[in-house]
Amino acid sequence: VEWTGHKLRICSKNNFPTAAGLASSAAGYACLMYALARLHGIDSVETISTLARIGSGSACRSVYGGFVQWVRGSDAQTSIARQIVDQNHWPAMRVLVLVVRDTQKDTSSTSGMAQTVATSALMQHRVASVVPARVEAMVAAIKARDFPTFAEITMRDSNQFHAVCEDTYPPLTYMNDTSRAVRRFCHRYNDFHGPRAEPRVAYTFDAGPNACLYLLDRDVAPVLALLGRYHKDLVVKGSGDGVVADGYVLPPELAKHFDDNPCLPPDAIRYVISTRVGAGPQLMPDESECLLNAEGYECMLLAVSPML
C-alpha cells in the first residue's frame, strides 16, 4: 500500500503513570513503532527495535518480550537490544509496582542522563568498571532462574544508579522519603528470614520515586498483606491469578517483626500494580477495545510490557 499523501491519527494512552520513572516513553514508542511497522508491512523485530530506539533508548528493549538486554554499541546499528529469554522462561517471577507519586517528575530521564554524563565522575567509574561484570552476572542469573543473585544485583545496581544521580552536578534527586521507606521495608522483609538468608524480595527505582519490586509467587501474598497493614484500603491493580492477598493471614511472628519497627508511613503508597514478565507489543483483535472509532481510520490498540 502506498501511504504517501495519507494522514494518520495516532492516539496513545498509558494505564500507568506517565513521566514518573516507570518507562512510559519506552512503552509508548515501542507501541508506536510496532504499529507503524505493521502498517508498512515490516515484521522484523530487530528493525522495529532499532527504529523505536530513535524515540526512546529503552524502547528498543520494550519491543521484545521477556527479559531483554540493551547491548552497548557505538552507533544505531550496533547499540541494539536482544532477548535473553522469553516471557515464559521464569513463570514464578512476579512484579509489584508501588506507585508513590503519579505526577510528572521535575527532570526528564533524557536531560537528567545528559547532565549526569557531563558532570559525574562516579558515572564514568560505573560504566567502565561496574556495569560490564554486573550485566554478565545478571544474564547468567536470569538464564539459571537464580533469584538470590538476581535480587542482590538488582538492589545494588539501583542503589548505585541513584548514587550517580546524587553525584551529578547539580544533583538529581529522584527518590523521596517514601521511596527510601520502601527500600527499608524490603530489607526488613528479607532480614526476617534470617540475617544471612537469601533475599526474597528485590527493589529497583528508575529515574523516579516509584518502586518496582521483584519477587516470586510464594512471597506475593505476605508482601501485599504487610503493605495493607500500613495502608487502609490499599488498591491493587493488575491481571493474572493471585493478584490480591484476600484471605491470607500473616504469620504472627512476621506481623510482629514489622509492628515492632514500623518502616512505612501510613497511606504513603497510592496504589499497587501487580503483574508478571510480559510480552512485547501486540495487536488487539477486538476493535471494540481500540482507542479510536472507525471514522475512516484503521484502529489499533497495542499493549507493551515496560519491564527491564
Image (spheres, rainbow, N blue to C red):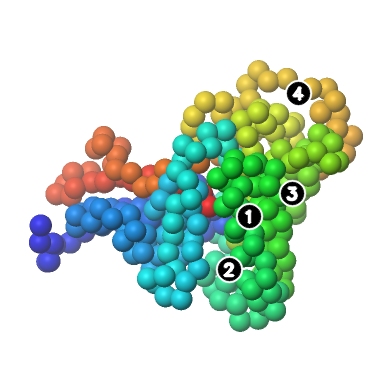
Of labels 2 and 1, earlier in sequence is: 2
Q: Look at the numbered disc 4 and give the secondary structure of its residue.
A: loop
Residue marked by disc 3: 183
Residue found at the very far top of the displayed protein: 247
Q: Which amino acid does label 2 sit on?
A: Thr
Q: Is residue 173 visible?
A: no
Pick the front one: 128 or 283: 128
Between marks 4 and 2 in the image, the one whose residue lies nearer the viewer: 4
Disc 4 crowd rating (10 Å Cα; few below 14, some 14-19, many 20+) is some
Badge count:
4
- Relative to 6, does residue 96 appear above or below in the rendering? above
Residue marked by disc 4: 250
> Which residue is pictured at 44% across the width and 52% down the height?
83
Pick the front one: 189 or 80: 80
Between marks 3 and 2 in the image, the one whose residue lies nearer the viewer: 3
Residue marked by disc 1: 137
Q: Look at the numbered disc 2 and give the secondary structure of its residue.
A: loop
Residue marked by disc 2: 107
* Distance from Cα at disc 4 to Cα at disc 1: 34 Å
Q: Look at the numbered disc 1 and give the secondary structure of its residue.
A: helix
Determine whether label 3 and label 1 are within 8 Å by CB: no
Between marks 4 and 1 in the image, the one whose residue lies nearer the viewer: 1
For residue 246, what is the image quadrant? top right
Of labels 4 and 1, earlier in sequence is: 1
